[in-house]
Amino acid sequence: MASVVIIEDDQRIRELMARVLADKGYEVSGAATALDGLQRIVGLSPDVVVLDMGLPDLDGAELLKMIRAVTDVPVIVATARSEDRDVIRTLNAGADDYLVKPFSVEQLEARLRAVLRRSTAEASTTAIVVGDLRVDPGSRVASLNDATLQLSPKEFDLLVYLAERAGVVVSKKQLMAEVWRQPYGGSEKTVDVHISWLRKKLGESAAEPGYIETVFGVGIKLVDPT
């Protein structure tokens, strides 16, 4: 199971998260200060970090910059700061996800699974093939009938997410949380627009679907149209 470093100055919260995650099989290390947390990250090379922003010795935003200077480990920010500007600034600074307190440990564990799936996909060198569509997460190249598709970074991320779950219906809320990394909300119109763009580049449309099928009232899925 994955290893987690929790950087949280509230002992009760830190110990609760550590106990529940350990019970689920995670290898957990906790730190009450930014500097201790950074030392643990460097020394342990964890699979994911849970970071509180209100730390006693250093603001979490500064610690995030320090973490990003030494590693690309996925970071889930868990904080009481809920203003949009804080969320946007933190995600732009390199956080992979953002949780606003209070939250359940079950919700945190779901976010852990999500960022771990993303980091595994990004590190993968195995191409995904669905019909005549080939998606290579490692090289970030997608092709249809051996012709390279000209996709924006977010279109490619969306295609990878759907290809990894070929045949499985995913909701727009899932896509906002795991592709756009906005689990706290956001306009689902963004998803609609990117799906429309992706369909166009795949040579299809909502009226005449091919690889991307809409399941009305539920979500969308990627299928082999042949």
Image (cartoon, rainbow, N blue to C red):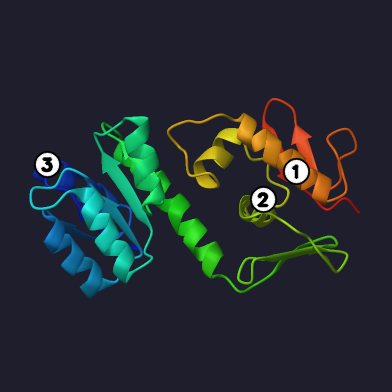
Query: Would residue 185 appear left or right of 134 to someone viewing this image?
Result: left
Identity of the residue drawn at 58% across and 41% down = 175
Check disc 1 and report its element: helix, strand or loop. helix
Residue 68: name its quadrant: bottom left
The reply to whether residue 193 is visible in this rendering is yes
Query: Would residue 178 appear left or right of 141 to someone viewing this image?
Result: left
Comparing 34 with 212, the one in front is: 34
Identity of the residue drawn at 12% across and 47% down = 9
**Disc 3 vs disc 1: Cβ atoms closer than 8 Å?**
no
Rendering coords of residue 128 (x, y %) = 70, 65
The first of marks 3 and 1 along the sequence is 3
Residue type at mark 2 is: Glu
Rendering coords of residue 178 (x, y %) = 52, 46
Residues packed near mark 3 inside 10 Å, few (<14), some (14 to 19) or many (20 plus) = few
CA distance for labels 3 and 2:
41 Å
Q: Which residue is mark 3?
A: 12
The first of marks 3 and 2 along the sequence is 3
Identity of the residue drawn at 39% across and 47% down = 91
CA distance for labels 3 and 1:
47 Å
Taking 205 as reference, is 51 above or below it? below
**Image quarter in which the C terminus is found:** bottom right
Taking 101 as reference, is 73 above or below it? below
Taking 224 as reference, is 206 above or below it? above
Comparing 163 with 151, the one in front is: 151
Comparing 197 with 158, the one in front is: 197
Residue type at mark 1 is: Trp
- Label 3 vs label 1, nearer the camera: 1
Residue 187: name its quadrant: top right
Which numbered circle lies on residue 197? 1
